[in-house]
Image (spheres, rainbow, N blue to C red):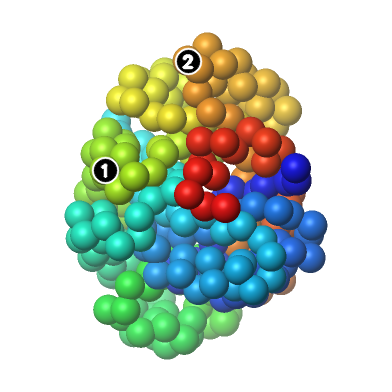
Amino acid sequence: MGKADLHMHTTASDGVCSPTRVVELAVEAGLSVIAVTDHDTVAGVREAIEAGVRLGITVLPGVEISTRMEDQDIHMLGYGIDIDDKRLLGRLDQLRLARERRNQLIIDRLNACGIDITLAEVWNTVKKEPGNDLTIGRPHIAEVLVRRGVVHSISEAFDRYLGEGAVAYASPERVTPEEAIRLIHDAGGLAVIAHPGLYEHDKLVEAIIGFGVDGIEVYHSDHTSEQERRYETIAKRYDLMITAGSDYHGERMGEMRHSHIGARTMDTRLLSKLMRGNT
């Protein structure tokens, strides 16, 4: 018996802590089970699992796949996946290429606004190299904007330039939620709709449930108590697993994105489907 936080990011995508450090923080928070769920990559999972073995905490292999449906970005969490599944890895490679095209489009739009930065500068600032299964995202671009003095904070960068509807926002072609669910299932995992409260589109959420999802992330750092009650009701109506996650990314330029590790947890006794083969 213990607590689980099933949504966190590492330096393999847009988190600020290494996989090992994320596991250490989870241990410090008193958690028993975590899942590493980087955006469109599993590059940090193996290191996290190895750290978990050393530190006595269960680390579930996970991923957060970027999808799009009806002009809405939808994130799909995959848990208990085979991180060596060739089809999954191949599709994640394609998604990272799409993310790179999106990033370049954002840079182009920033340049059109008179902000002279390059994608190479972003990679260099976050000390990553392209082509090694790692991803960069809008928070990394926001960090460069702050360092350049274009904006005063990460929040301002999103409000003025990078958030949905802002002047430099861009969203590439992505897989559909239905395809992401199939990819996760074919890789031996369970598919969970991430933070549905951020979409403000419950009819779309229920349509995605019809594609065969296994659960809903009911408890999330950005959900209100009313949203948690509503999605718990929906999950129970469709007999879906209820999960919880902090969506930890860490503190960047003095700002914490979402919340700290352990901000949203669930009882590990509710994880019987996920724990098979991972204990």
Determine the residue positioned at 41% across, 19% down. Answer: 206
* Depicted 131 relative to depicted 92: above or below: below
Q: Position of residue 268 (x, y in %)?
A: 67, 41
The local crowd at label 2, few if under 14, some if 14 to 19, many if 20 or more residues have their Cα within 10 Å, is: some
Q: Quadrant of the N terminus?
A: top right
Residue 95 placement (x, y as % from top left): 26, 58
Spot the residue most to the top. 237
Mark number, residue 152: none
The answer to which image quadrant residue 72 occupies is top left
Q: Amino acid at mark 2?
A: Tyr
Q: Earlier in the sequence, mark 2 or mark 1?
A: 1
Where is residue 26, by image quadrant? Answer: bottom right
Answer whether residue 222 is visible to the viewer in this image: no
Q: CA distance from mark 2 to mark 1?
A: 22 Å
Q: Is residue 124 left or right of residue 11?
A: left
In the rendered view, tell whether residue 195 sits above or below residue 59: above
Look at mark 2 in the image and give the residue it sits on.
Answer: 238
- Relative placement, left or right, of 16 versus 226 is left
Q: Is residue 129 left or right of residue 223?
A: left
At a point 47% along the width and 15% down the height, the residue shown is: 238
Residue sitting at x 22%, y 49%: 173
- Residue 172 x %, y %: 26, 53
Check the image and report above or below for 45 versus 33: below
Viewer-closest of 262 and 51: 51
User: At numbered mark 2, what does the secondary structure look like: helix, strand or loop?
Assistant: loop
Q: Nearer the viewer, mark 2 or mark 1?
A: 1
> Which residue, given by chain and number where applicable, does mark 1 sit on?
186
- Find residue 80 and report its horizontal and vertical position in percent: 44, 48
Element on which disc 1 rests: helix
Give the amino acid at mark 1. Asp
In-front residue for pair 227/47: 47
User: Can residue 39 be seen at all in this image of the molecule?
Assistant: yes
